[in-house]
Image: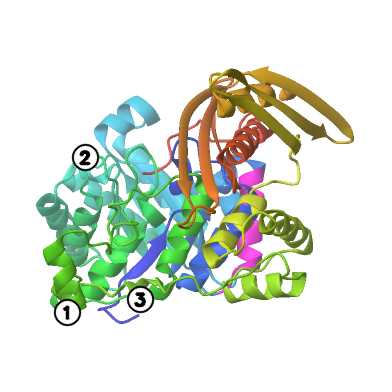
């Protein structure tokens, strides 16, 4: 690949999913991976196969079905991890094993309980084993920015000699500042052979993930690890859309470019927001709802005269082209499927049937449904796993200024109908209480967010809730024209996810690289 091209390594499905409350289903992961392929990212880190059977199966399905990007899987420099990653990836068109181990004194002493020689031996053995499966092997030194420089460079030397072709410099805890991180990347770049790609993986604990990644690019990094909407552990990862548009907008000054299909950025951002339940703040750079909004009279006058007076990016560049698709209650299955196809969404027959049923239900209550509405419907339905324990059949609420808010809910568990009622502080509280009674699950509401999918009085309400159930935090999402129904759907979705959580679903042996 030319030296002026920056590879985009997307870790939304691995590090991004480690954000609290995110638990993507396998269909959701595949849907996001397919959209990342349409975005033309270079590498998709599909997951950490050894962490659970469900994670293994998700990585394997992505590897066998998604074409275009390199499909990567994470593995500690541990034989079982590497074997499992290779097994999950073997159906991919092109694939990479991404190995890692911690290298800072604090991690080696307090987490690994390993000496420097032991870590070096593990790197050598692990990378050699990975190279036995594929020539495309990446090595990451977890907590690199807090690692003693001489030892860090020795770790990278050993990894390269063992066959690693990409060396990753993670700012695992978001500690570095741009001038420090840039200098570190420069020294690593000078220390490793020219054919080896130097990569960055920066976290946002101090709000510097994008700045640090950019400093890395300026100093020779030619791969940047990112997540859509900047999601991830703690304060999140380097934001894909921000790096993408910095490089695109300031390409001449930076002397680098990327191969992303920028018109897919907004669609990708919305999909990830909908499936994860992590909303995008209005003033978020590039993809926030206010990113191209102008309220000041002076700004409005300037933009009307010449858009470039206050906009350094054209919103059309990232896919903000308006609501192109408009369907209504008279639209048939063919038109619905065709509209999804034009949005780049392809569903299995079962998911298509469920999504179409929801579309017809909502179309009876909303005159027109736009492309954003369709994406919201599909994202909600694709997230309803086949193993859902409870299905919402009906919800009836009543209340007012002189009447206690009351809700009656009817759920179905297999063939068994369950009906319960509850009184609450408001209609939403009552609906959630009734669902909790019917499901027989004790849950604590942690967060509640409501937004509209599009504008207007008949806009779909998009509700995201986060619950704590028996120590697990789970997220649920619901879409409906009525905010009470959307809230009920979100609450039930979260309960279903809590019931699907299996013991040992995440690795407890060592923290994942951040």
* Residue appearing at x 37%, y 66% in the figure: 8
Who is closer to the viewer here, 191 or 293? Answer: 293
Q: Secondary structure at mark 2?
A: helix
The earlier-in-sequence mark between 1 and 3 is: 1
Q: How many marks?
A: 3
The quarter holding residue 403 reads top right
Residue 189 shown left or right of residue 316 in the figure: left
Residue under label 1: 305
Q: Residue 36: percent from the left, percent from the top?
A: 49, 66
The earlier-in-sequence mark between 2 and 3 is: 2
Q: Main secondary structure of the magenta part?
A: helix
The earlier-in-sequence mark between 1 and 2 is: 2
Residue density around tag 3, few if under 14, some if 14–19, many if 20 or more, within 10 Å: few
CA gap between label 1 and label 3 equals: 18 Å
Q: Residue 76: percent from the left, percent from the top?
A: 47, 45
Residue under label 2: 146
CA gap between label 2 and label 3 equals: 41 Å
CA gap between label 1 and label 2 equals: 50 Å
Who is closer to the viewer here, 348 or 439? Answer: 439
Residue under label 3: 316
Q: Nearer the viewer, mark 1 or mark 2?
A: 1
* Quadrant assignment for the N terminus: bottom left
**Can residue 185 be seen from the camera position used here?**
yes
* Quadrant assignment for the C terminus: top left
Q: Residue 326: percent from the left, percent from the top?
A: 58, 71
Magenta-colored stretch includes residue 66: yes
Question: Which residue reaches farthest front?
Answer: 402
Magenta-colored stretch includes residue 175: no
* Residue appearing at x 75%, y 37% in the figure: 394
Residue 401 shown left or right of residue 311 in the figure: right
Q: Secondary structure at mark 3?
A: helix
Magenta stretch bounds: 54-67
């Amino acid at each position: 690949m030319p030296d002026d091209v920056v590879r985009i390594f997307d870790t939304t499905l691995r590090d991004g999913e480690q954000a609290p409350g995110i638990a993507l289903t396998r269909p959701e992961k595949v849907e996001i991976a397919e959209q990342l392929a349409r975005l033309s990212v270079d590498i998709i880190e599909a997951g950490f196969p050894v962490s659970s059977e469900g994670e293994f199966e998700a990585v394997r399905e992505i590897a066998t079905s998604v074409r275009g990007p390199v499909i990567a899987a994470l593995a500690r420099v541990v034989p079982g991890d590497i074997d499992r990653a290779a097994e999950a990836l073997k159906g991919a068109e092109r694939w990479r094993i991404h190995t890692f181990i911690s290298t800072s004194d604090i991690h080696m002493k307090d987490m690994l309980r390993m000496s420097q020689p032991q870590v070096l031996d593990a790197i050598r053995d692990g990378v050699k084993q990975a190279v036995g499966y594929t020539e495309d092997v990446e090595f990451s030194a977890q907590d690199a920015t807090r690692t003693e420089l001489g030892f860090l460079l020795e770790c990278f030397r050993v990894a390269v000699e063992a066959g690693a072709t990409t060396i990753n410099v993670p700012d695992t805890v978001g500690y570095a500042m741009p001038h420090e991180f840039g200098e570190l990347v420069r020294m690593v770049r000078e220390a490793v052979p020219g054919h080896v790609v130097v990569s960055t993986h920066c976290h946002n604990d101090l709000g510097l993930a994008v700045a640090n990644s950019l400093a890395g690019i300026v100093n020779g990094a030619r791969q940047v690890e990112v997540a859509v909407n900047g999601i991830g552990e703690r304060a999140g990862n380097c934001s894909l859309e921000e790096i993408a548009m910095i490089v695109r907008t300031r390409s001449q000054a930076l002397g680098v470019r990327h191969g992303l299909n920028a018109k897919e950025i907004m669609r990708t951002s919305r999909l990830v927001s909908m499936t994860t339940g992590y909303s995008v703040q209005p003033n978020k750079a590039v993809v926030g709802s206010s990113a191209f909004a102008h309220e000041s009279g002076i700004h409005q006058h300037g933009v009307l005269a010449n858009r470039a007076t206050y906009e350094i990016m054209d919103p059309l560049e990232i896919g903000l082209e308006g609501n192109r698709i408009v369907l209504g209650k008279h639209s048939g299955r063919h038109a619905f499927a065709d509209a999804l196809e034009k949005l780049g969404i392809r569903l299995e027959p079962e998911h298509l049937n469920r999504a179409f049923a929801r579309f017809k239900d909502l179309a009876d209550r909303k005159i027109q449904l736009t492309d954003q509405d369709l994406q919201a419907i599909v994202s909600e339905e694709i997230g309803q796993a086949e193993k859902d324990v409870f299905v919402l059949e009906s919800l009836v609420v009543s209340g007012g200024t002189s009447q206690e808010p009351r809700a009656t809910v009817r759920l179905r568990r297999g063939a068994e109908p369950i009906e319960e009622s509850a009184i609450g502080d408001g209609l939403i509280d009552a609906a959630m209480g009734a669902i909790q009674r019917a499901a027989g699950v004790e849950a604590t509401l942690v967060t509640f967010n409501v937004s509209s999918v599009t504008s207007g009085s008949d806009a779909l309400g998009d509700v995201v809730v986060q619950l704590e159930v028996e120590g697990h935090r789970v997220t649920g999402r619901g879409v409906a024209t009525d905010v009470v129904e959307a809230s009920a759907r979100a609450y039930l979705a979260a309960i279903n996810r809590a019931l699907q959580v299996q013991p040992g679903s995440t690795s407890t042996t060592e923290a994942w690289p951040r």
